[in-house]
Image (cartoon, rainbow, N blue to C red):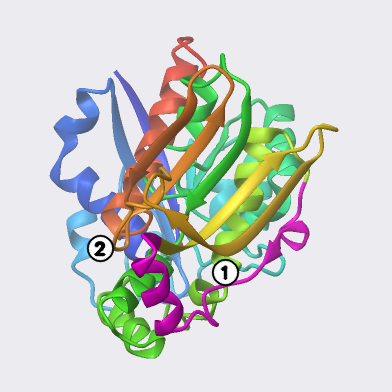
Amino acid sequence: MATYSLALIGFGGVNRALAELIRDEPERFVALGFELKVVAITDLGFGSLVQADGIDLGAVLAMPRGASFAGLPGGSAEPRNEDVIKNSPADIVVEATFTSPIDGEPAVSHVRWAVEAGKHVVTTNKGPVALHGAELSRLAEQNSVRFEFEGSVMSGTPVLRLAHTMLAGLQVKGVQGILNGTSNYVLGQMETGLSLDEAVSEAQALGYAEADPTADIGGSDVRLKVAILANELLGANLTPGDVATKGIEDITPDDVARALAEGNRWKLIGQAVRQEDGTVTASVCTLALPASHPLAGISGATNAVSFDTDLLGHVTVSGPGAGRTETAYALISDIIAINTTLKGEVHA
Ligand code: HSE
């Protein structure tokens, strides 16, 4: 059975959730035909740790915030990302640092260093995919490694790989999605009479919203995801700046109540559409959807994507779009895809 050695870049919620699954449920991976061993961890707070024989995940998961890997064998107080990515004995680099919507850094460099060092990369980070996805995929191909990023859109709910595999025989004419749980939750709460600010506070308390919810409410989180969908599913070459974006900030309780009375529901919709001349246009905006629309019934913090296809019409997938374990599952699905390729089976 194959054993894959992992370097975890970032040891926040998502990579900690992955480490917990590896520690607590090794049989889940054995059933998939491989074992996982974490040989390196880097983190802005903890520093870095490299242990080729495998890190004791129970021990590092028990370390409180504010502690340091310095003093452990192979440990340092410095994150040493570049050295760890290039020189640690990892087969797969698991990139889960913060998303920069401006330049994608430092995640873009993490991906470049890894693939140039001949290591596969899996990431949940929207930044590098939305801003440099095509270039990084090409670089990975040139270096005969995989760059996988299922979790960059809708966390572990399958969207990208579902489209690449199960919809491969269809022409996808366009995609529409509810791609931000916070804004969908807020709009739903406004239907019960809450103001936008009250609903945002609730979403923050429930852990859906970012600490600064501007990206959730203003649509820029969805903008990155739409750029990824347009490029990955419709073969476009868009940057986030090409996606006209308007969030939910100007929706009032009156707008919501009026729409409801007419049988409609306001939703923040990210969409990408192939035009008749072959070009792809993408946008983020609020739409009052009639009850018959496939996305009208998506409530709470749930996300959904509806594919408009030639032979099946609309195909819609819904599920979580955030959450530490839900997002860690995206990393697992990426590792499954790498294992499948390495075993010479179907290209996922
Ligand atoms: N804050 C985001 C959301 C998390 O509400 O969907 C996932 O990008």
Q: Which residues are magenta?
A: 238-264
Residue 178 visible to an observer of this rendering: yes
Up the image or down, 63 lies above or below 128; here it is below
User: Does 32 sit left or right of 246 as displayed?
Assistant: left
SS at mark 1?
loop
Image coords of residue 15 (percent x, y): 35, 56
- Given residues 56 and 10, the one toward you in this image is 10
SS at mark 2?
helix
Magenta span includes 252: yes
For label 1, the residue is 219
**Residue 302 image-quadrant placement:** bottom left
Q: Residue furthest front?
A: 262
Residue 56 visible to an observer of this rendering: no
Up the image or down, 312 lies above or below 253; here it is above
Please name the amino acid that badge 1 sits on.
Answer: Gly
Q: Are marks 2 and 1 in contact (CB under 8 Å)?
A: no
Image coords of residue 347 (percent x, y): 52, 16
- Circle 1 packing at 10 Å, graded few (<14), some (14-19), many (20+), is many
User: Does 278 sit left or right of 284 as displayed?
Assistant: right
**Residue 331 image-quadrant placement:** top left
For label 2, the residue is 60
Magenta span includes 241: yes
Residue beneath the point at 33% across and 64% down: 13
Image coords of residue 30 (percent x, y): 21, 25
